[in-house]
Image (cartoon, grey):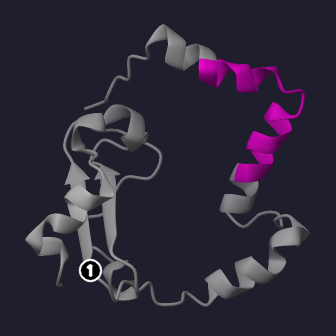
Amino acid sequence: MVAVLVLRCATFERSAASFDNPDFVDVVIHSYRHRYGVVPGDSAHTEVEARLAEQPEITIPTIVLLGANDGVDPPSVEDKDAVHFKGAYSRHILAGIGHNVPQEAQRYLRTQSEICARSELRDR
């Protein structure tokens, strides 16, 4: 099944403004090449990237929302990332939602206080 995202005109206009940047195509292509390890990232971030490569434990409360219909990075059934979260952690795969969770699944998004108040997120 393919999720179809219908954008409101105002939302599209705000996003489309980025297409007018003369570096847009180069930035997007470099972003994907970096994501897949084909090219190095910006040298200004070398120290941060080295720390993240060590995969440090994440101790803050975390909620992960994944679109079940994500055609870019489909979620696996097995949660291989859970071992990195030492604080309260909850992972949800959202049916009918694709790659852009914040825009496609606004009904699932809540304020931080609402989320943290839910008992299943207080303790693992």
User: Who is closer to the viewer here, 98 or 121?
Assistant: 121
Q: Position of residue 113 (x, y in %)?
A: 26, 60
Q: Can residue 78 be seen from the camera position used here?
A: no
Q: Position of residue 107 (x, y in %)?
A: 23, 36
Q: Secondary structure at mark 1?
A: loop
Magenta-highlighted residues: 14-31
Image quarter (top left, top right, bottom left or bottom right) of the C terminus: bottom left
User: Who is closer to the viewer here, 74 or 114?
Assistant: 114
Q: Which quadrant of the view contains residue 118?
A: bottom left
Any magenta on residue 19? Answer: yes
Which residue sits furthest front?
Answer: 113
Q: Residues within 10 Å of mark 1 (few under 14, many from 20)?
A: some
Check disc 1 and report the residue beneath it. 88
**Amino acid type shown at disc 1:** Ala
Q: Can residue 6 be seen from the camera position used here?
A: yes
Q: Is residue 58 left or right of residue 117?
A: right
Against 32, residue 63 (above or below) is below
Q: Position of residue 27 (x, y in %)?
A: 81, 43
Image quarter (top left, top right, bottom left or bottom right) of the N terminus: top left
Which residue shows up at 23% across the image and 54% down it? 93
Which residue sits furthest top?
Answer: 9
Q: Position of residue 89 (x, y in %)?
A: 27, 76
- Principal SS element in the magenta part? helix
Q: Which quadrant of the view contains residue 7?
A: top left
